[in-house]
């Protein structure tokens, strides 16, 4: 779409992302990336929280597929795998008290000579601290 690749764009401003969140009944117009994650992590229903975090991950995954392979994704294709992954996935475990946990993912395309990475940092309560991608 010609926009700058950022977590903010991928999760909140990309047309697929806005369709997905609006389809789930979330109003995202005034959200930042941090406020989105804080909203999700503040939810008391662990299953809903996990599912919404998986939807966010699925948005990132499908954007990566679009950028690297040109694969176009529709709203349902983002939500359906998120539902399946939530029921079969390994749960994130909290670090010990007063520690933080840094989860990292990266990919590289040798043919194009390009690479990308993402980092998410949370504290021992599971509260979102920071995310970075490139």
Image (cartoon, rainbow, N blue to C red):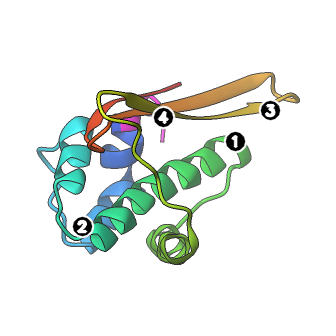
* Residue for badge 4: 2
Q: Which residues are magenta?
A: 1-7
**What is the spatial separation of the Cα atoms under label 1 and label 3, in whole angstroms?**
8 Å
* Residue for badge 3: 109
Q: Which mark is residue 68?
A: 1
> With 35 as the anchor, is 59 left or right in this view?
right
**What is the spatial separation of the Cα atoms under label 2 and label 3, in whole angstroms?**
33 Å
Residue 3 on the magenta segment: yes
Q: Do the numbered discs 3 and 4 sit on residues whose CB atoms are within 8 Å?
A: no
Q: Do the numbered discs 4 and 1 sit on residues whose CB atoms are within 8 Å?
A: no
* Residue for badge 2: 22
Q: For the point 23% across and 36% down, which residue is it?
A: 34
Mark 2 / mark 1, whichever is N-terminal? 2
Q: Secondary structure at mark 2?
A: helix
Q: Nearer the viewer, residue 5 or 97?
A: 97
Mark 3 / mark 4, whichever is N-terminal? 4
Q: Position of residue 95 (x, y in %)?
A: 41, 38
Q: Position of residue 46 (x, y in %)?
A: 29, 67
**What is the spatial separation of the Cα atoms under label 2 and label 4, in whole angstroms?**
22 Å
In the image, residue 48 above or below residue 43: below
* Disc 4: CA contacts within 10 A as few (<14), some (14-19) or many (>=20): few
User: Is residue 6 at all visible to an observer of this figure?
Assistant: no
Q: Residue furthest left?
A: 30
**What is the spatial separation of the Cα atoms under label 2 and label 1, in whole angstroms?**
26 Å
Q: Position of residue 20 (x, y in %)?
A: 35, 65
Q: Secondary structure at mark 3?
A: strand
**What is the spatial separation of the Cα atoms under label 3 and label 4, in whole angstroms?**
20 Å
Prevailing secondary structure class for the magenta stretch in the rendered image: loop
**What is the spatial separation of the Cα atoms under label 4 and label 1, in whole angstroms?**
14 Å
Mark in the foreground, 2 or 4: 2
């Amino acid at each position: 779409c010609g926009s700058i690749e950022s977590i903010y764009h991928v999760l909140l401003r990309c047309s697929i992302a806005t369709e997905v969140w609006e389809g789930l009944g979330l109003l995202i117009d005034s959200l930042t990336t941090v406020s989105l994650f804080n909203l999700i992590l503040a939810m008391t229903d662990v299953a809903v929280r996990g599912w919404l975090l998986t939807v966010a991950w699925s948005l990132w995954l499908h954007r990566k597929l679009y950028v690297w392979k040109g694969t176009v994704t529709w709203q349902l294709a983002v939500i359906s795998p998120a539902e399946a992954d939530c029921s079969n996935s390994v749960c994130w475990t909290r670090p010990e008290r007063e520690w933080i946990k840094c989860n990292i993912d990266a990919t590289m395309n040798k043919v194009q000579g390009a690479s990308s990475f993402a980092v998410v940092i949370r504290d021992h309560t599971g509260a979102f601290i920071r995310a970075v991608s490139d």
